[in-house]
C-alpha cells in the first residue's frame, strides 16, 4: 500500500494547484511544493475524498489565511513572516493545531470551509494521540507532546510519500 491516497499520476494532474498555492507562502517555492504535496496526502485523512478535493483545499490554504488573518491574530498564532507572506505551510498548520489542540471547529474558524481539509488531517492526528495520552493518565504537557509527535511523524511520512525535491 501507499502512505497516502493521492498518487503520482493524480499529483501530476492536479499539481498546478499545489504550485499556485506554494507561491503564497514565504521561503523557497520548491520546498513549499514538497511540503504542500505532503499536506495533500494528509488532507485525505482530513476528509478530502479525492485528489481533486485535496489539491483544491491546498490551493485555497494561503489565501484563506489572508482572508482570516484577524482570527489567527486573535488566537495568538503567528501566521505571517517579516515580509508579510504566510509562514511555511507545515509550520502554519502545526502552530494552528497546537493553538486549538486539534479541535476541528476551532480550526475551521481559522481556515474556513475550503482549506479545512488541508488542515484537519493534522488536527485529527494530533487530537487522537492527545486524547489517548490523556485517557492513559498523562499530564497536559505530556499529552501535548504525544499529539505533537504524532503530528510531526505524519508530516514526515506523507512528505516522503508525496515528492522529493528532485521530483518537483
Image (cartoon, rainbow, N blue to C red):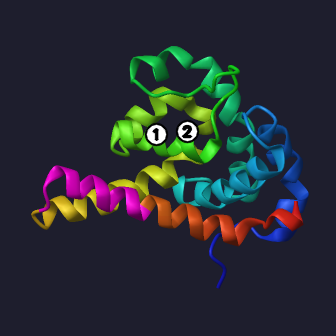
Per the image, the residue denoted by label 2 is 92
Q: For this view, does 120 lie left or right of residue 31?
A: left
Residue at (68, 70) in percent of width and height: 160
- Secondary structure, mark 2, is helix
Q: How many marks?
A: 2
Residue drawn where x is 70% and y is 25% of the image: 85
Asked if residue 149 lies in the magenta stretch, the reply is: yes
Disc 1 to disc 2, C-alpha distance: 5 Å
Apparent side of residue 17 relative to residue 36 in the rendered image (left or right): right
**Badge 1 is on which residue?**
95
> Residue 140 at what x, y percent from top left?
17, 50
Task: Name the residue: 30% across, 57% down.
Answer: 145
Q: Quadrant of residue 35?
A: bottom right
Q: Residue furthest left?
A: 137
Q: Nearer the viewer, residue 147 or 116?
A: 147
Residue 21: quadrant of the picture: top right
Amino acid at each position: 500500500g501507499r502512505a497516502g491516497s493521492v498518487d503520482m499520476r493524480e499529483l501530476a494532474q492536479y499539481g498546478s494547484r499545489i504550485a499556485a498555492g506554494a507561491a503564497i507562502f514565504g521561503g523557497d517555492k520548491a520546498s513549499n511544493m514538497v511540503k504542500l504535496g505532503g499536506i495533500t496526502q494528509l488532507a485525505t485523512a482530513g476528509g478530502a475524498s479525492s485528489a481533486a478535493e485535496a489539491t483544491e483545499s491546498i490551493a485555497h490554504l494561503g489565501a484563506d489565511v489572508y482572508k482570516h488573518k484577524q482570527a489567527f491574530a486573535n488566537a495568538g498564532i503567528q501566521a505571517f513572516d517579516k515580509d508579510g507572506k504566510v509562514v511555511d505551510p507545515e509550520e502554519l498548520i502545526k502552530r494552528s493545531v497546537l493553538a486549538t489542540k486539534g479541535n476541528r471547529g476551532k480550526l475551521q474558524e481559522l481556515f474556513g470551509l475550503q482549506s479545512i481539509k488541508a488542515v484537519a488531517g493534522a488536527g485529527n492526528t494530533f487530537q487522537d494521540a492527545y486524547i489517548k495520552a490523556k485517557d492513559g493518565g498523562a499530564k497536559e504537557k505530556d499529552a501535548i507532546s504525544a499529539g505533537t509527535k504524532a503530528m510531526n511523524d505524519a508530516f514526515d511520512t506523507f512528505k516522503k510519500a508525496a515528492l522529493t525535491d528532485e521530483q518537483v
